[in-house]
Amino acid sequence: MAKTRLKCRSRRSAAAVVEVGKLPADSHHTVRQDGDEVVIKYRSALWPLDVAEWAALEGHASDKAAARVMARLRDETSVRRNRCKARLCRPAPRAEPYVFYRRR
C-alpha cells in the first residue's frame, strides 16, 4: 500500500484532518497524525488528492503543501502508467506470414 505525507499548518490542523479523514471499516485508505504532518495510506490515488484538497480548502494545509502531494501523486501514477504501457505494448513475437493459395 502506498503512502504520502501532507504538511499541515499546526498539530491542531493535522488532528482536524485526521478526525475528518477517518473512514470506518476501510483499511485501504487511512490517515494518521505524525506531529504536524498527516500520513495518508492509499490504494486509489484519488484518496490523497481528496484529503489534500479538503485540507487546503479548509485552511489546515497551505496550497503549496497540497500541491506537493498532488504533484507527487501525478508523478507516481504516470510512472506506473508508463510501466504498464511498456508491458502491454511489447510487440508480439512475429509469426510466419499466412500464405493463401488460389484454387485453379
Image (cartoon, rainbow, N blue to C red):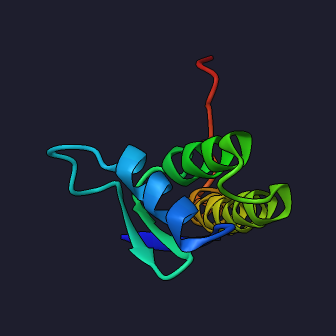
* Residue 53 image-quadrant placement: top right
Residue 52 in the figure: left or right of residue 22: right
Q: Whole-percent x and y of residue 19?
A: 36, 51
Q: Nearer the viewer, residue 24 or 91?
A: 24
Quadrant occupied by the C terminus: top right
Q: Whole-percent x and y of residue 22?
A: 31, 49
Residue 31 in the figure: left or right of residue 67: left
Q: Residue at x 63, y 52 (%)?
A: 52
Residue reaching furthest to the front: 12
Q: Residue at x 73, y 57 (%)?
A: 70
Q: Nearer the viewer, residue 35 or 46?
A: 35
Q: Whole-percent x and y of residue 77?
A: 64, 60
Q: Nearer the viewer, residue 26 or 62?
A: 62
Identify whether 24 is placed above or below 68: above
Residue reaching furthest to the right: 64
Q: Residue at x 66, y 68 (%)?
A: 76
Q: Whole-percent x and y of residue 65?
A: 76, 65
Q: Residue at x 79, y 59 (%)?
A: 62
